Image (tube, rainbow, N blue to C red):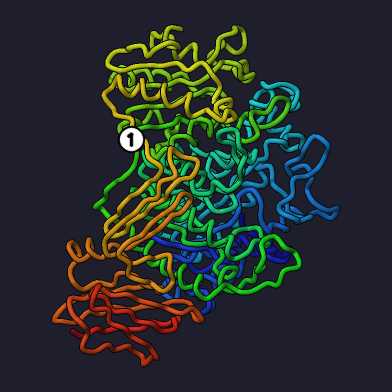
């Protein structure tokens, strides 16, 4: 989802020349954004960290511009592609041998570029990337972000990949489309190649920083497993959780990924943005949570497609931001990529009309974005309350979802083996957990999960030890619903469960043997220790294509839940309170079309005017983000900045005076609503700035309005 900075052939020699490191104590990083260019006041959104995109000899100068404005500094660049002309270019063109190549010889290029391709991470390329990151290490960056380790499933015909195959498997290369076994092996190799590349580059960066007496964090910003599998890309998702040198992960979920079409009740739709986004974030969180590493959730107020309208962007942004907030264990956010394309870009007034007049961001949308961003800075809330369907239900996924996506027999194009199980859970109001199979050997992975749905359609278990962990969990009281008809052709790849292809055994045969379960589990749940197993003999993809698929799945789930005294409660909405913030989404295509009505004293954070409302009603396919004034007054005190379209810092209430500072991008109007115990006697803004104020006695709030400045404004409200 990221553009690249064009690199000059002239700076290749400069990469080895260390710059003067800038000493910097570890800074805050709860919120961040990525930006290729230097600082400008129009994009000063005042998050904690500025992740400066692209490296090279000008990195230190660009980074210093942001550092002087108070930002913690990170650096981001691509690991699979980028403006790396010094490496890609040769006297005869580009290094075709090292670019991912399809069967017909077509090179996989990035975007519309004819010079930048998706690379095969050969040893020479990895050594080059080590040099690429050195200027950022030397300039004192707190963190390096190597984004999007991507290998396309349809590729595997380049000379570089063929050599990697022979090294890995010790035998001649096989065309990936020659058999399911060859495709599975090719994907597994792609998976390993980028794991190894990241390990080597991260080790190098950490060693270089250590030699300078400093530490540096290394993170991977990348799409969710769900999206990569659906887009037919292989990436070392969960395997990175075993990479000691990796410190964190940015879950790159946004409109472009979450609007990818899927099938539910036999209907293919590309606008299940909230539900798909929820599942993407759930997978990312489920993958990272057991490791304790940092995780940021990304949402994008626009998207990579520049031909959508602002109304389209706004609707989809609200879908993804609400889905991202449904995980109270995550309080780090990349609040946007590329603020310049949001606050300085132009987009059509009419959706997907190439002739439509283009315009800059509408003023009210800009104000709304800053309100949401300021709220994201405050999401580390410990007081959490759920209003949802049954909790404790999980769907298991494996990274091998990415291994079955190309010829000769690719799995369902819409990833229905996953959505056929997961989508009905979200549509019926369950705050579904996505459990990563590759994490099963870590302690406590299934601690919050009472019921687990599993299929081997579209994915396979990489290790037999995973079955031991599942069997132990079931015997301890867990309930497993296995949904599979056993017909996936990839069941017969040469793997551990079939003695490398010498038997006809299926992967579930090994699982059932360890559980002591037989075919009678197809008719009714079968007891296993303190737990239960039920086998639904159908393919999840068939459930997705069936208009009555949920009516097949839910009764089987309900019968299993009853065995462990778990009541199956379904509703058409998800609602969560995180401290004063109320997050809610009402689903369409659900058990009912009933609206959700909420009463109290709320500030509507999706309304740029920050109105105080006594009731909020959501119809199906609507969402909201509210600030609960009553909760805030009871728990945070009588004087508090409740909502602001500007970054609020240094808030303090003492001696009858509330004080705080603000900062925001120039050209964007700021509104600040403040909860107070009484009408203010005086409001002061320093340096002197034009502002308006309005006291609302009924809600006990003061509304201030002024234009943002990319400098610190000090506000004092005297009671």
Residue 112's spot in the image, x, y percent?
A: 75, 56
Residue beneath disc 1: 390
Q: Nearer the viewer, residue 181 or 690?
A: 690
- Whether residue 501 is visible, yes or no, is yes
Which quarter of the figure is the C terminus placed in? bottom left
Q: Please name the residue shown 35% across and 21% down the image.
A: 560
Residue 163's spot in the image, x, y percent?
A: 72, 32
Q: Is residue 132 left or right of residue 239?
A: right
The crowd level at tag 1 (other Cα within 10 Å; few <14, some 14-19, many 20+) is some
- Whether residue 296 is visible, yes or no, is no
Q: Quadrant of residue 391?
A: top left
Q: Is residue 682 left or right of residue 129?
A: left
Q: Nearer the viewer, residue 308 or 429?
A: 429
Q: Please name the residue shown 73% across and 25% down the image.
A: 408
Q: Quadrant of residue 633?
A: bottom left
Residue 568, above or below 355:
above
Element type where label 1 sits in the image: loop
Q: Please name the residue shown 52% across and 74% down the image.
A: 43
Residue 569's spot in the image, x, y percent?
A: 33, 34
Residue 96, above or below 139:
above
Which quarter of the figure is the N terminus placed in? bottom right
Q: Please name the residue shown 27% across and 48% down the image.
A: 385
Residue 249, above or below 482:
below
């Amino acid at each position: 989802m990221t553009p690249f900075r064009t690199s000059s052939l002239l700076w290749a020699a400069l990469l080895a020349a260390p710059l003067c490191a800038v000493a910097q104590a570890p800074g805050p990083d709860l919120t961040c954004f990525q930006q290729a260019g230097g600082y400008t006041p129009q994009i000063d959104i005042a998050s904690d960290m500025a992740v400066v995109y692209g490296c090279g000899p000008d990195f230190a100068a660009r980074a210093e511009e942001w550092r002087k404005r108070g930002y913690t500094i990170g650096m981001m660049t691509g690991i699979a592609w980028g403006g790396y002309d010094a490496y890609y270019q040769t006297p005869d063109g580009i290094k075709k041998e090292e670019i991912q190549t399809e069967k017909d010889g077509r090179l996989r290029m990035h975007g519309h570029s004819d010079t930048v391709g998706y690379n095969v991470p050969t040893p020479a390329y990895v050594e080059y990337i080590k040099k690429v990151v050195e200027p950022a290490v030397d300039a004192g960056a707190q963190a390096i972000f190597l984004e999007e380790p991507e290998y396309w499933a349809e590729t595997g015909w380049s000379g570089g990949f063929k050599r990697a195959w022979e090294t890995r498997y010790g035998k001649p290369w096989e065309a990936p489309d020659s058999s399911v076994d060859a495709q599975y092996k090719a994907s597994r190799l792609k998976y390993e190649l980028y794991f190894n590349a990241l390990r080597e580059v991260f080790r190098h960066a950490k060693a270089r920083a250590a030699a300078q007496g400093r530490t540096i964090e290394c993170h991977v910003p990348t799409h969710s497993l769900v999206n990569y599998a659906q887009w037919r890309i292989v990436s070392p998702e969960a395997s990175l959780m075993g990479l000691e040198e990796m410190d964190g992960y940015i879950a790159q979920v946004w409109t472009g990924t979450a609007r990818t079409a899927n099938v539910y009740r036999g209907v293919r739709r590309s606008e299940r943005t909230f539900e798909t986004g929820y599942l993407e974030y759930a997978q990312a969180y489920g993958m990272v949570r057991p490791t304790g590493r940092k995780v940021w959730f990304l949402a994008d107020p626009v998207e990579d497609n520049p031909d959508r309208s602002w109304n389209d962007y706004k609707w989809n942004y609200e879908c993804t931001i609400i889905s991202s907030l449904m995980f109270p264990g995550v309080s780090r956010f990349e609040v946007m990529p590329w603020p310049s394309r949001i606050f300085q870009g132009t987009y059509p007034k009419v959706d997907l009309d190439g002739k439509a007049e283009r315009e800059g961001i509408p003023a009210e949308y800009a104000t709304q974005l800053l309100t949401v961003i300021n709220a994201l800075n405050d999401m580390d809330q410990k007081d959490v309350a759920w209003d949802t369907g049954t909790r404790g239900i999980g769907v298991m996924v494996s990274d091998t979802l990415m291994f079955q996506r190309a010829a000769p027999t690719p799995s369902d194009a819409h990833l229905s083996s996953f959505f056929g199980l997961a989508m009905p859970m979200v549509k019926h109001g369950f705050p579904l957990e996505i459990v990563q199979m590759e994490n099963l050997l870590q302690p406590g992975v299934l601690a919050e999960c009472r019921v687990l749905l599993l299929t081997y359609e579209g994915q396979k278990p990489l290790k037999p030890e995973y079955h031991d962990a599942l069997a132990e969990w079931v015997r301890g009281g867990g309930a497993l619903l296995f949904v599979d008809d056993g017909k996936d052709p990839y069941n017969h790849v040469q793997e551990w469960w079939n003695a490398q292809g010498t038997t006809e055994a299926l992967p579930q045969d090994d699982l059932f043997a360890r559980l002591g379960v037989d075919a009678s589990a197809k008719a009714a749940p079968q007891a296993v220790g303190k737990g239960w197993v039920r086998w639904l003999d159908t393919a999840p993809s068939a459930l997705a294509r069936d208009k009555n698929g949920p009516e097949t799945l839910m009764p089987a789930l309900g019968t299993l839940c009853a065995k462990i005294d778990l009541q199956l409660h379904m509703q058409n909405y998800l609602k969560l309170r995180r401290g004063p913030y109320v997050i809610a989404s009402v689903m369409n295509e659900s058990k009912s079309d009933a609206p959700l009505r909420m009463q109290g004293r709320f500030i509507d954070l999706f309304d740029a005017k920050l109105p105080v409302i006594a009731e909020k009603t959501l119809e199906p396919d609507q969402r909201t983000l509210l600030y609960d004034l009553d909760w805030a007054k009871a728990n945070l005190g009588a004087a508090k900045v409740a909502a602001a379209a500007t970054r609020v810092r240094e808030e303090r209430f003492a001696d009858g005076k509330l004080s705080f500072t603000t900062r925001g991008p120039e050209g964007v109007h700021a509104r600040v609503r403040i909860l107070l115990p009484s009408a203010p006697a005086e409001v002061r803004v320093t340096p002197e700035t034009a502002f308006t104020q309005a006291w609302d006695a009924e809600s006990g709030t003061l509304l201030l309005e002024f234009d943002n400045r990319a400098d610190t404004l000090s506000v004092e409200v005297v009671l």
